[in-house]
Image (tube, helix red, strand yellow):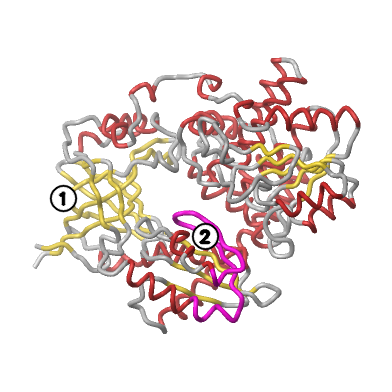
């Protein structure tokens, strides 16, 4: 008997615990370095950091109050991703609560580019702006802010991105990632920074009961932005998301109610997966495909019928995005397969691709082939615009820094980056970067690694264990959903779902049978063998069918042993 090392397993498994006598919950807490008190109940306020610990918070709030006292025109300047649109919406709700009218601007991804730029200042100026409040951008907008100052417009920056150069000349720069910041937890997203501003401002202007009700009622927006921006579910993010998922389940916002309906989301069971796979992609679709203003308008809508129409439009855009993404991916695969498949980096390009989708293409290529990938398109000036995604073993932004002489601009972090290259430098960059990555990753196993929390025995697989594990959540970045390993089971049944896209399995170990579902597993249908022995890495959950709960194993990867 030997393991089938062809298609399966897809990834290299790193198993952290093999002692099945230990409590699964205890093992998971230990693996994540979480204290036992992590499971104890707490109040939200007990886990939150005071807003005034953010740099320039008092200065920024004072300038906003001054604008309100003088009747000045305030413009909220947002961003086109989910963090940006939830930040913008939260600010709109804040000023509604304070009874002060404001307008907002969200840049168009392809026409305007990211962040506050001089053209954005001109738009705000044409609207009569006296004060611009940025959300989820602004830390790198020095030129635009200096231009705003020259027009007599003050700017209050609220942002969370890293400070790469000198601070912009804004009236206030509220950002936990300023180089001089002493904020206790820096990994918060843009909507959380906006939430902190709302906290500081409403605490000064509203009664205690009213400002607390306001903050609690908008944790749904904070939760969506935090999950969509892949922030670590640790520290105050953990508290915000834990409470925010409950608020999202019972939200009164017409836009979110309709978005949940069109996404097929059951309101009594909201999880980070619900947000990440169903709600966030639809909110993101507007900025990727057309204009992110649509998503903001959905989130701030007070009319149910209007919200329904906007949710339907977002759903349509998301379906179009999925179709285009698949077309792009097919084209990228065809292009790459005609080249040297031994290269350790995938670089593909098509000047017809929309810039808003190339990151999704490189992400899928990275997942499928377990190596860094960059997808390029061309902008209106003929420059190559690229989006890179990378693996744990390769810090893509550090690598790109070695080639910054070729870039008009670039930036990113360990696993993702963006860049713009002039046409005359594109070919030489591709050649030199490919050579560099080939050398850097030479001899490395490029299969993706899958961290498995623990091997489990059949007596640990039950609904009580599922609930105990759920108490460690919500899960997300830096507190990942636990994967468990069941070894030496026997496949007793295989059925196709959705025309073969997914598989439903029944496996046996000892005297027990387990129902398994494996999403997007059509490529493995032909290696499934009745009565074959297998090891299964899975997430354990409770599936409610026709009102009856039952244990279900959601397969992540498998190893199948073939008899000879």
Q: Does label 1 or label 2 sit earlier along the sequence?
A: 2
Q: Residue at x 44, y 19 (%)?
A: 41
Q: Position of residue 79 (x, y in %)?
A: 68, 50
Please give left or right for residue 341 compared with residue 58 in the image: left
Q: Residue at x 75, y 32 (%)?
A: 94
For the residue carrying disc 2, how many other residues have a C-alpha within 10 Å: few (<14), some (14-19), or many (20+)? many
Mark carried by residue 504: none
Please give left or right for residue 436 compared with residue 460 in the image: right
Quadrant of the image containing the C terminus: bottom left
Count of all numbered marks drawn on residues in the image:
2
Mark carried by residue 417: 2
Seen as rendered, the residue at the extreme bottom is 338
Camera-side residue of 89 and 149: 149
Q: CA distance from mark 1 to mark 2?
A: 41 Å
Please give left or right for residue 308 compared with residue 231 in the image: right
Taking the magenta stretch, the answer to whether it contains residue 422 is yes
- Residue 84 visible in the shown view: no
Quadrant of the image containing the N terminus: bottom left
Label 2: which secondary element: strand
- Residue 354 visible in the shown view: yes
Q: Residue tagged by mark 1?
A: 488
**Residue stretch in magenta:** 405-429
Taking the magenta stretch, the answer to whether it contains residue 459 is no
Q: Position of residue 15 (x, y in %)?
A: 23, 46
Seen as rendered, the residue at the extreme top is 208
For the residue carrying disc 1, how many other residues have a C-alpha within 10 Å: few (<14), some (14-19), or many (20+)? some
- CB within 8 Å, label 1 to label 2: no
Residue 376 lies, with reference to residue 45, above or below; the image says below
């Amino acid at each position: 008997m030997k393991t089938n090392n062809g298609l399966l397993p897809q990834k290299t498994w790193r198993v952290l615990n093999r002692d099945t006598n230990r409590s699964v919950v205890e093992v998971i807490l230990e693996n994540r370095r979480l204290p036992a008190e992590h499971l104890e109940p707490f109040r939200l306020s007990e886990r939150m950091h005071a807003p005034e610990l953010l740099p320039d918070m008092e200065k920024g709030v004072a300038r906003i109050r001054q604008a309100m006292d003088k009747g000045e025109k305030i413009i909220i300047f947002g961003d086109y991703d989910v963090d940006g649109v939830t930040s913008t919406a939260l600010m709109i709700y804040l000023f509604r609560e304070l009874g002060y009218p404001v307008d907002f601007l969200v840049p168009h991804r392809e026409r305007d580019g990211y962040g506050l730029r001089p053209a954005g200042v001109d738009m705000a100026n044409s609207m009569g702006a006296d004060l611009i409040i940025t959300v989820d951008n602004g830390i790198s907008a020095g030129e635009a802010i200096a231009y705003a100052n020259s027009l007599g417009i003050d700017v209050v920056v609220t942002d969370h991105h890293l400070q790469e150069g000198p601070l912009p000349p804004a009236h206030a720069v509220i950002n936990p990632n300023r180089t001089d910041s002493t904020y206790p937890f820096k990994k918060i997203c843009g909507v959380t920074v906006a939430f902190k501003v709302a906290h500081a401002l409403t605490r000064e202007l509203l009664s205690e009961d009213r400002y607390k009700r306001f903050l609690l009622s908008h944790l749904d927006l904070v939760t969506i932005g935090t999950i969509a921006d892949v922030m670590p579910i640790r520290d105050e993010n953990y508290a915000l998301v834990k409470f925010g998922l409950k608020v999202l389940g019972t939200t009164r916002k017409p836009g979110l109610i309709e978005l949940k309906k069109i996404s097929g989301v059951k309101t009594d069971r909201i999880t980070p997966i619900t947000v990440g796979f169903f709600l966030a992609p639809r909110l993101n679709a507007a900025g990727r495909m057309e204009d992110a203003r649509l998503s903001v308008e959905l989130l701030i809508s007070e009319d149910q019928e209007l919200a329904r129409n906007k949710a339907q439009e977002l759903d349509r855009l998301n379906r179009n995005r999925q179709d285009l993404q698949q077309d792009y991916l097919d084209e990228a695969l065809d292009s790459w397969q005609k080249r040297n498949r031994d290269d350790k980096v995938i670089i593909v390009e098509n000047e017809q691709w929309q810039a808003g989708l190339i990151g999704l293409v490189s992400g899928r290529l990275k997942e499928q082939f377990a190596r860094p990938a960059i997808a390029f398109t061309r902008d209106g000036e003929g420059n190559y615009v690229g989006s890179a995604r990378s693996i744990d073993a390769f810090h893509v932004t550090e690598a790109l820094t070695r080639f910054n002489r070729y870039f008009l601009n670039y930036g990113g972090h360990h696993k993702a980056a963006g860049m713009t290259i002039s046409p005359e430098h594109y070919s030489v960059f591709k050649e030199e970067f490919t050579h560099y990555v080939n050398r850097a990753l030479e001899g490395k196993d490029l299969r993706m690694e899958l961290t498995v929390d623990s091997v489990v025995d059949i007596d640990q697989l039950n609904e009580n264990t599922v609930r105990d594990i759920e108490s460690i959540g919500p899960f997300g970045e830096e507190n990942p959903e636990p994967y468990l390993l069941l070894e030496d089971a026997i496949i007793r049944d295989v059925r196709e779902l959705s025309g073969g896209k997914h598989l439903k399995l029944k496996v046996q170990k000892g005297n027990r049978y387990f129902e398994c579902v494996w999403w997007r597993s059509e490529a493995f249908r032909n290696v499934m063998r009745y009565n074959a022995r297998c090891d299964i890495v899975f997430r354990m959950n409770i599936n409610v069918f026709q009102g009856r709960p039952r244990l279900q194993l959601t397969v992540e990867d498998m190893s199948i042993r073939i008899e000879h």
